Amino acid sequence: MSIQELFLKLYDFWLKQGCYIAPTYDLEVGAGTMTPDTFFRVLGKKPWKVAYVQPSRRPTDGRYGENPHRVQKHFQFQVIMKPSPDNIQRIYLDSLVSLGINLSEHDLRFDEDDWESPTIGAWGVGWQVLLDGLEITQFTYFQQAGGLELYPVSVEITYGLERLEMFLEQKDNIYDLKWSEDVSYRDLRFQEEKEFSVYNFEQADIQMLQHWFSSAEKEAQRLINQNLLLPAYDLCLKCSHLFNLLDSRGAISVTERVKMIGQIRTLVNQIARKFVEREGES
Amino acid sequence: MEFLLEIMTEELPSSHVRSALLQLEEKFNQEFQSARIGVNSLKTLGTCRRLVVLADLEARQPDEEEIVTGPPRQVAILPDGNFSPAALGFARSQGISIDRLEVIKTQKGEYLGFKRLKKGRPTEEIIAEKLPSIISSLTFPKNMRWGEKNFRFSRPIKNLLCLFNGQVVPVEFEGLTSNNRTWGHFIHSPKEIQVNSFAEYYQALKENFVLVDPEERKQSIFKQFQEKMADLKAEVYPDEGLLDRLLWNVEQPLVVIGTFPEKYLELPLEVLSTAMREGQKLFSMVRGKKQLPYFLGIADAPADPKNFIASGNERVLKARLEDARFFWENDLKIPLAERVPQLKNVVFQEKLGSYEDKVARLQRLVAYLADRLDIKSEKKALIEAARLCKADLLTEMVREFPELQGKMGGLYSRKQGFSETVSRAIYEHYLPQSLEDPVPESTGGAILSLADKLDTIVGVFGVGYSISGSSDPFGLRRNAHAICKIILEKKFHLSLSRTLDKAISLVKDKLTVPEAQLKRTCLEFFEGRLRFIFEKKGYRYDLINAALAPGIEYLDYTEARIKALNDLKQSKNFEQFILMAKRVKNILKEVPRARLNSALFKEKEEKELYSALKIIQKNAEEMLAKGDFAGAQKIIFRLQLPLNNFFDRVLVMSEDKKIRNNRLALLAQVQNLIQQLADYSQVVIESETK
């Protein structure tokens, strides 16, 4: 099974669970959790079910295409169910079965792994799912986002598509994976990994990134004051990505790290609070 | 009669399972005791998906006599001795005949009433009543909510099986209704099972791939370990912590064996075993001290017929080792010394500056310690080690595996040609991590570790932090324990007070707390930690108080004092001597000091005491100077006879003020001497407590 068949099957499975299939979000994000389809929808009381593929960028994970497992961009398959269904673990297992995995021949474990994102003021409790020792999914019950207690609680299931595909194809090298029958992961991504690793680690202009960061931060605050919450949140995502780039350029000291994460969180928390207030009024 | 409870949950963290089982045992015992339900036995079992309580209980509370009171006596009994209408009404409302009525005395006065036998309540009623509050009262380090509930628990609760004497005890809890159902292994046999007893429960679970008894799982793991290793003539690298975690993570332990390419054996053992343990929870295998290219893993499955589990783990481990090799080779490309300037970008603590600042302080502190401890030959190497010791924080390996800090610095520096003294000191400078952990073997490692930890304690207190209860964010207690342990085990004769002065002077420009106050804080803190350490070693608290009283200037001496005191506590003179010391101390309370003038002695006994004191003082002080407290203590005990005679025959509180003051001055000299050994008045002796 190729990667595209893999996510098509997952779409099909979660569609049948009543999920809305969201288009991929068109900004750089570090994880599927950060897109508006998750961030805003887990706030407030309205039920929500969504599934989508989200490319996720982690500049520091780049390895110039030389490491068989690490890449600065990978693909997540993200599911949110709100409120979390009672039998969600079983539903999740069924999704693996739908991919043709015969669980009785394997060791599947829900291994304690709580999740936290200080940038968006969020944390949750859950597991990493290990299949024969390989982490294929992050499974989290969201407790807080944007600094707010969440009620009802959403469950987030994030499949690492490359990991899952490596398991399915029994491959040791990410670039050997099949995207489709005749297009390999290498064809699609190898050059990109090489060039972006150079950019992320060596070429990105630090001064320009710092300048962009502070502009985006100011603009986000201005938009919050205008109650333009969705555009303001986009600017927070930009800040987050710029921060990650600066980090991979080694341009952030520990104190600055705390300060910049705090700046983004302050913005995100304001957005979350206002969003919930607005939803309460409608 | 049998009580069986199973709280079925989604996968709990292993530490939560252990803690929850302990809490359940304690709480059920308490509740049954306070409800007067006889407990013949009670134990807990469980896995990551089920918390199980099994008990043998009496069927019901014992019956008891109960008193029911009605109207007051004056109202209930008429002057003619007959019952009033109120009394008759009371009897009628209670449905009893009037001949059971009697006068009952209470604290509020006399009332008419009657006695009746209250039937004990059945045990299942008590269980049903208490269970919800017991479950709600379980605490975890971290809780969560799920779905649309506001209830908090470690992980979602799925089912409650609750049986007493084969019958379901009806309980409603957070949307769950208790029943007699359970389920087999979540992945390998998720079928529903109905049971009526523990025997059925245990057996059915076993058939469905769940070993509910942790001891049985442990035995199974050991047995499988041995089977796997027999052919290879190898041993499992012992890792109790890992085994303990995994024991609770699985319901059906299956040991799998796998290999990794031999080329990774070139990596240091530390790196290999960390990558296996921390990364993937695998056990390494050794023959003698040699690492073998094999690992053992504990899966949660009945079997691995197609070898998927073993080969899957092999692939993941290979990737991790490949990463580790990438880090190792990459890290070695940059000499440690070249990384040092980068430490200015790594914050040690916001108010205390970067690691560059810390390393500068450490270089001066180790130089000071090397001088004080008279190991000048290693001084240069130590300063070098201090300069390099934090550089590994900038390596990729330490970023990936933080627990390898220090060790990596040691390994890299050795590889890059630094002397054994330098690399050993760096390697060991985080030791000991706890009181159970060994101290550095090398003197250099011990000194660097001391300096590092002293600097942290002085600095953190010095910028205004304090610790209380469970709040000790910088691990100051752990650091202080390590310092005490190193000084005591390495027998470093080091003035704590002067060492603190030095450490404080080095961090002077950052302090927000006045220096004198900071030093006091540090000394009090060390005294407290020392007390804790001695208590852990099993010394009596009163002996500890006595031995700590002369101060903690030299920790090795403090320990020698307590050892001497402890050794002497069995001797026959001990008690009398203590009483004597107390008497001296009492008599000197609030007495102004006067000068001793031997010309003023009148009685034979005071002269004898004085001359004995002179000799004993001279001998004892020689021994004290050498740190021989046991010897000094024995000599000082010889004061007992002259002191006894003195107290028997001489009136200290003489009418003549001059003579009185002179006698007090003599006793003060005795006191001065014995106080150098201990404050004996703190020792509790049996004749006092009786």
Image (spheres, rainbow, N blue to C red):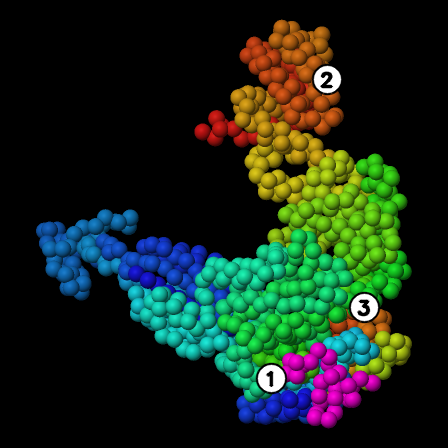
User: The numbered mark 3 sits on a residue in which chain?
Assistant: A
Packing grade of label 3 (10 A; few <14, some 14-19, many >=20) is few
Q: Decide if residue B106 is on the left or right side of residue B484.
A: left
**Disc 3 target residue:** A256
Residue B63 lies, with reference to residue A132, above or below; the image says above
User: Quick one: SS at disc 2?
Assistant: helix
Q: Are marks 3 and 1 in contact (CB under 8 Å)?
A: no
Front of the two marks 3 and 2 = 2
Residue B573 lies, with reference to residue B431, above or below; the image says above
User: The numbered mark 2 sits on a residue in which chain?
Assistant: B
Q: Position of residue B559 (x, y in %)?
A: 66, 34
User: Quick one: SS at disc 3?
Assistant: helix
Q: Position of residue A149 (x, y in %)?
A: 60, 75
**Distance Cα–Cα, label 3 vs label 2:** 63 Å
Q: Which residue is nearer to you in this view: A140 or A128?
A: A128
Can residue A216 be seen here? no
**Disc 2 target residue:** B618
**Distance Cα–Cα, label 1 vs label 2:** 83 Å
**Distance Cα–Cα, label 3 vs label 1:** 33 Å
**Disc 1 target residue:** A80
- The image quarter containing residue A5 is bottom right
